Image (spheres, rainbow, N blue to C red):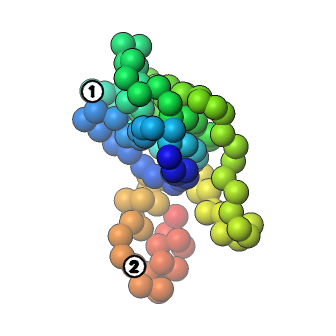
């Protein structure tokens, strides 16, 4: 029943799926990188899946590496997230360097560490 904006994440070698929702969930995936292992599908929906068909999940500007698939599921289509103020919209990091950003800068960082991290990219 909720709305989720999944942005600037690096997914690697997942075991079943990366992003999923049920019961009328709305998921807007944007600017993420998906680097698969043995599982190639990002969402839990696949050809033989016939359970809860009510969610909506969309991919916008995601980078799908090495034959990754992202099954869009629309019930109904959703629009770009609306934030109370434009400055609240998360900055979308370029997917070409997102893996490096996540590997170097994820986790708890103090102010000076954030600045140093961003300069290193």
Q: Secondary structure at mark 2?
A: loop
Q: Is residue 44 found left or right of 90 in the rendered image?
A: left
* Residue at the spot 37% in from the left edge and 23% down from the top edge: 51
**x and y percentages locating residue 88 in the rendered image:** 66, 69
Q: Residues within 10 Å of mark 2 (few under 14, many from 20)?
A: few
Tell me if I can see residue 92 in this picture: yes
Which residue is drawn at the image coordinates 54% and 28% (left, top)? 73
Q: Is residue 101 above or below residue 95?
A: below
What's the distance in space between the residues labelled 1 and 2, CA to CA?
Answer: 32 Å
- Image x and y of residue 94, in percent: 60, 52
What residue is drawn where x is 43% and y is 81%?
113
Residue 17, disc = none
Q: Within 10 angstroms of label 1, few (less than 14), some, or many (20 or more) residues?
A: few
Q: Which residue is mark 2?
A: 109
User: Residue 96: in sight, yes or no?
Assistant: no
Task: Using the rendered view, name the quadrant where residue 34 is placed.
Answer: top left
Total numbered circles: 2
Label 1 with label 2: CB-CB less than 8 Å? no
Q: Which residue in the protein does label 1 denote?
A: 38
Q: Secondary structure at mark 1?
A: loop
Q: Residue 11: x and y, percent?
A: 38, 45
Residue 75 x %, y %: 59, 30
Residue at image location 34% in from the left, 42% down from the top: 12
**Seen in the image, is 27 located left or right of residue 36?**
right
Choose top left, top right, bottom left or bottom right for residue 29: top right
Q: Earlier in the sequence, mark 1 or mark 2?
A: 1
Q: Residue furthest top?
A: 48
Q: Quadrant of residue 39?
A: top left
């Amino acid at each position: 029943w909720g709305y989720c904006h999944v942005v600037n994440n690096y997914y690697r070698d997942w075991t079943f799926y990366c992003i999923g929702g049920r019961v009328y969930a709305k998921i807007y995936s944007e600017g993420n990188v998906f680097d698969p292992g043995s599982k190639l599908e990002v969402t839990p929906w696949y050809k033989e899946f016939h359970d809860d068909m009510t969610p909506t999940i969309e991919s916008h500007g995601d980078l799908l590496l090495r034959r990754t698939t992202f099954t869009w599921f629309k019930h109904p289509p959703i629009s770009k997230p609306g934030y109370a103020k434009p400055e609240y919209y998360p900055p979308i990091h370029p997917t070409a360097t997102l893996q490096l950003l996540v590997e170097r800068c994820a986790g708890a960082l103090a102010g000076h560490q954030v600045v140093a991290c961003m300069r290193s990219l």
